[in-house]
């Protein structure tokens, strides 16, 4: 049965429509992946030389052990945010005479074949032959290679379990991520140094070859924990359990916007809260609120251009994330929307209002930055106007021509389904316009007026919101059937 499921997985990959859609995007992602592998490979060969240059009087292996904890923690976060774990269409398989244990075992084993598990070995293997094998011989040298392999797969299963538990036990999964991120942040700010813990711990691991067996046992335990979780949640009625949980939240606060707009706002809010991908984008947007903390104590915070960049992504976090797929969020039921007694003007107004409200809410949540670094606050004041009156409308008009069908209940973070070259390129004018405006005023030594001008651009869009929405509704009316046909592909 395992081989049969493997064959089905191969057929699903070979027959996937991904290969025929977004060719430019696939080429770009392929080149990016190849470039990353080449970087890892080059780093593996020259890593020993670089360590000798920066740490001339130290053993390269001691240096690696000192900083290995940063790789472990960062890798878990990157995997959680970017790695897409394989899955089967359980609805089709659960009604067949196939053991759930076989399905769970297949998914768990299949998850091992990931770019994030392959890429580290492009560094580990050449580094082993160039540096490690010359300093540590025999089984002790080989144990270094085996322990590094174990670390890669332990990270994989930790991130896998966090990802799968997030929908079932948000508190536990979120707490684990918060601990990992908090440790890295506190270390970055100098409250303590993780390297003082890292070196003795990994010195012990690499200095005692018997730990290889212990780490392999940990991997086996994590494998069966992941398998047990998947097996225990492989039920048809469990697939919609989150929908039943969140149905209690009616988002009654939107009733203040009237029966028409309020109803549409509640539907959009429920769409975000009840589906994996928009919900993941929502939490990603919340994380952007802490983005300035990375720069508060650095030199970047003194650059006004960098502050514009920070302000754009902080105050417009949901506009930039959710707005990229403005119409695609409704692609699975877009024909139903067209058949309802809903004016396109009202539909677009609800989209704009929800994103505008998110900008305002995030802006007020950023008020505490005023006490730490006032510049972040007043640049944010200009950028919240800019994001509301310019960024949202940019994405709105983009969606009329470049919207694609997506499955909103798929894993969300860094899922590229529905994205094309346009979604990547539109960020350039959105980012360049405020920077160019500021640089023009800076040339005349009017830096503060540069920020004011950026805010005015957004304010103009807000003041003429009704006229812009009328034009947007007219454009969408002319293209609604083309948009709907794109969602059928």
Image: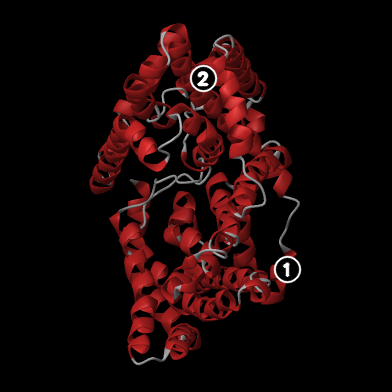
Which residue occupies the foreground of this view, 156 or 140?
140
Q: Residue 145, position in %: x, y?
A: 44, 17
Q: Which mark is residue 155?
A: none
Q: Which mark is residue 150?
A: 2
* Residue 392 seen in the current view: no
Q: Residue at x 44, y 13 (%)?
A: 141
Q: Residues within 10 Å of mark 2 (few under 14, many from 20)?
A: many
Check whether the beta carbons of the residues at disc 2 and disc 1 lie within 8 A of each other: no
SS state under label 1:
helix
Task: Work out whether mark 2 precedes mark 1 in sequence or the reverse, and give the earlier one.
Answer: 2
SS state under label 2:
helix
Instruction: Name the quarter where the C terminus is drawn.
Output: top left
Q: Which mark is residue 253?
A: 1
Q: Residue 209, position in %: x, y?
A: 54, 11
Q: Residue 195, position in %: x, y?
A: 58, 38
Which residue occupies the foreground of this view, 112 or 49?
49
Height in image: 302 above or below 15?
Answer: below
Q: Is residue 143 left or right of residue 214?
A: left
Which residue occupies the foreground of this view, 317 or 4?
317
Q: Residues within 10 Å of mark 1 (few under 14, many from 20)?
A: few
Q: CA distance from mark 2 to mark 1?
A: 50 Å
Q: Residue at x 55, y 53 (%)?
A: 284
* Residue 198 seen in the current view: yes
Q: Residue 122, position in %: x, y?
A: 34, 28
Say which of marks 2 and 1 sits in front.
Answer: 2
Q: Is residue 51 left or right of residue 232?
A: left
Quadrant of the rendered image containing residue 183: top right
């Amino acid at each position: 049965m395992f081989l049969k499921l493997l064959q089905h997985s191969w057929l699903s990959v070979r027959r996937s429509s991904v290969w025929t859609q977004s060719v430019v995007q696939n080429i770009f992602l392929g080149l990016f992946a190849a470039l990353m592998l080449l970087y890892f490979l080059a780093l593996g060969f020259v890593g020993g030389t670089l360590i000798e240059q920066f740490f001339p009087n130290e053993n390269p292996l001691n240096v690696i052990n000192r900083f290995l904890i940063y790789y472990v923690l960062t890798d878990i976060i990157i995997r959680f945010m970017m790695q897409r774990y394989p899955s089967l269409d359980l609805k089709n398989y659960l009604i067949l005479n196939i053991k759930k244990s076989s399905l769970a075992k297949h998914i768990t084993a299949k998850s091992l074949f990931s770019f994030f598990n392959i890429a580290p070995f492009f560094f580990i293997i050449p580094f082993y032959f160039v540096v490690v094998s010359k300093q540590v011989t025999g089984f002790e040298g080989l144990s270094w290679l085996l322990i590094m392999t174990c670390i890669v797969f332990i990270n994989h299963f930790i991130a896998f379990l966090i990802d799968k538990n997030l929908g079932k036990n948000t508190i536990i999964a979120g707490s684990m991520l918060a601990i990992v991120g908090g440790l890295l942040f506190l270390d970055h700010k100098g409250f303590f140094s993780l390297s003082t813990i890292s070196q003795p711990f990994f010195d012990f691991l690499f200095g005692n070859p018997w730990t290889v067996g212990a780490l392999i046992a940990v991997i086996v335990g994590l494998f069966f924990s992941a398998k047990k979780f998947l097996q225990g949640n492989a039920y048809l009625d469990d697939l919609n359990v989150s929908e039943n949980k969140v149905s209690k939240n009616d988002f009654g606060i939107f009733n203040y916007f009237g029966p028409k707009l309020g109803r549409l706002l509640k539907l959009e809010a429920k769409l975000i809260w009840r589906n994996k991908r928009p919900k993941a984008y929502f939490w990603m947007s919340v994380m952007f609120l802490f983005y300035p903390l990375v720069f508060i104590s650095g030199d970047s915070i003194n650059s006004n251009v960098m502050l514009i960049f920070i302000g754009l992504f902080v105050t417009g976090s949901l506009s930039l994330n959710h707005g990229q797929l403005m119409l695609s969020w409704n692609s699975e039921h877009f024909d139903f929307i067209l058949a309802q007694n809903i004016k396109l003007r009202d539909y677009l107004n609800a989209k704009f209002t929800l994103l505008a409200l998110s900008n305002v809410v995030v802006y007020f949540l950023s008020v505490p930055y005023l006490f730490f670094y006032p510049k972040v606050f007043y640049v944010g004041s200009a950028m919240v106007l800019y994001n509301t009156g310019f960024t949202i409308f940019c994405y709105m008009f983009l969606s009329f021509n470049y919207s694609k069908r997506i499955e909103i209940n798929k894993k969300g973070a860094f899922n590229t389904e529905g994205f094309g070259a346009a979604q990547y390129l539109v960020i350039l004018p959105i980012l360049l316009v405020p920077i160019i405006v500021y640089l023009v005023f800076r040339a005349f030594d009017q830096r503060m007026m540069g920020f004011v001008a950026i805010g005015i651009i957004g304010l103009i869009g807000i003041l003429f919101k009704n006229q812009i929405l009328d034009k947007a509704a007219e454009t969408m009316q002319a293209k609604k059937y083309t948009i709907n046909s794109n969602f059928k592909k």
